Image: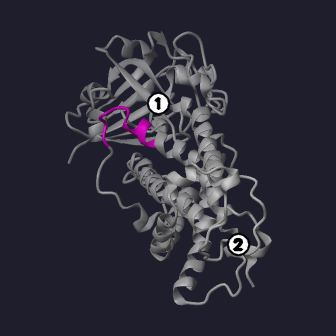
Amino acid sequence: MNGSRAWRSPIRGPWITSVFGLVLLIGIPVEFVTGLISYAAYNPRFSTNDPNPARGLFGLYLFDWLTSPSWVYRLTEGIHVMLGLALVPVVLAKLWSVIPRLFTWPPWRSVARLLERLSLILVVGGVLFEMTTGILDIDYLTTIDFYSAHFFGAWAFIAGFVVHVCVKFGEMLRALRSRSLRTELRTGLEGTRPEDIDHGLVPPEPAAPTISRRGALALVGGTSLVVCVVTAGENVGGFMRRSALLGTHYRSSGPAGNDFPVNHTAAGRQITAAETGPDWRLVLVGARRLSVSRAQLTSMPLTTANLPIACTEGWSTTQTWTGVPLAALARLVGIERPGRAQIESLDSLTVTLSGAQVCSAGSMVAFRVNGADLSLDHGFPARVMVPAAPGTHNVKWIARIEFSEAS
């Protein structure tokens, strides 16, 4: 039985399916690679940093994350999130175009078709799972372990995707060559006709067209463009911030100098005034141990740098930070060649920085932003800022830094 009898749109067929497939063939590998880059940015070789401790061989990385250029994580994560959102309309259109084949019976008639059907379980289930978890995480609407679910879901999806591409690539090329894109873009509704060749997608009894192939491509492409426009401002910043109508993180978070996004407020993290008041001390541990006040920090030689905060949800902001270089604090406790630094915060977050991150010229314990003291929500009395690091590694409300000598 051919399920296509229930689906009568005359534009449905191998050609338009292959056009959507080609877009995904380009976009999905970029999504996968930028996702792996995002994971690598956490320096997961340090156990305190790894969001996927059960990763096994899937998390093998042989390099420490870089510190220059300072905007590299902002770029890669911005691409990952914005491209992922832009591909949602394409994925939905691709699924619409192949619905008849999902109801074909018997489900396979050859080994190649069996592999295709098996891969569809991972491809369709995987892409819907990745899209759903990614979108929900943007505004913290999921209670699952997002990092592990998204990470292992991506590997399952890409396995099915590779098999699917190997099986369908030749068919896709033949379908793309069967019609001219230029001709289709010049063909309106009145000239729309069903395709001649049939791979189980062309309806045997097509209905009258209600949209042309040109219109369908414009609808899907236009929707993707609109999604980009109303979300990209959160990452690009500047005047485009006003166009981020679907942005969830651009909200005022403090007085002058501190008016930029924040993920977690002090109240949300249960940071109290007593913990951050005059009695606050930053404990530094190395060859010796020191406890320094905020006043002592501000009296040390300072550095100023323009650094971004870039988060996994896709938003970012670049501000001007002032503070004490991390390398100088390491020397203060007798560590001349730092191999790592373990940072602990008042809200019990622990992050480990590599030696290269500690020694980077822009890495600092910051206590001012844009010339003003940090607000409580932005990390007062002091926070760590590291070039190119994920936002969560720019630890707020720091309490302790332990430096280790390089081996």
Q: Which residues are magenta?
A: 66-77
Of pointers 1 and 2, the one earlier in the residue sequence: 2
- Residue 235's x, y, as percent? 51, 32
Spatial CA span between label 1 and label 2:
46 Å
Numbered tag placed on residue 100 in the rendering: 2
- Around disc 2, counting alpha carbons within 10 Å, would you say few (fewer than 14), some (14 to 19), or many (20 or more)? many
Q: Amino acid at mark 1?
A: Ile
Report if residue 260 is visible in the image.
yes
Q: Amino acid at mark 2?
A: Pro
Is 378 drawn above or below residue 151 in the view shown? above
Q: Is residue 79 left or right of residue 340?
A: right
Task: Say what secondary structure mark 1 lies in.
Answer: strand
The residue located at (39%, 25%) in the rendering is: 307
- Residue 349's x, y, as percent? 52, 40
The residue located at (54%, 82%) in the rendering is: 115
Residue under circle 1? Answer: 309
Q: Is residue 31 or residue 48 the one in the foreground?
A: 31
Q: Is residue 216 left or right of residue 172?
A: right
Q: Is residue 67 or residue 11 the one in the foreground?
A: 11
Is 55 drawn above or below residue 357 in the view shown? below
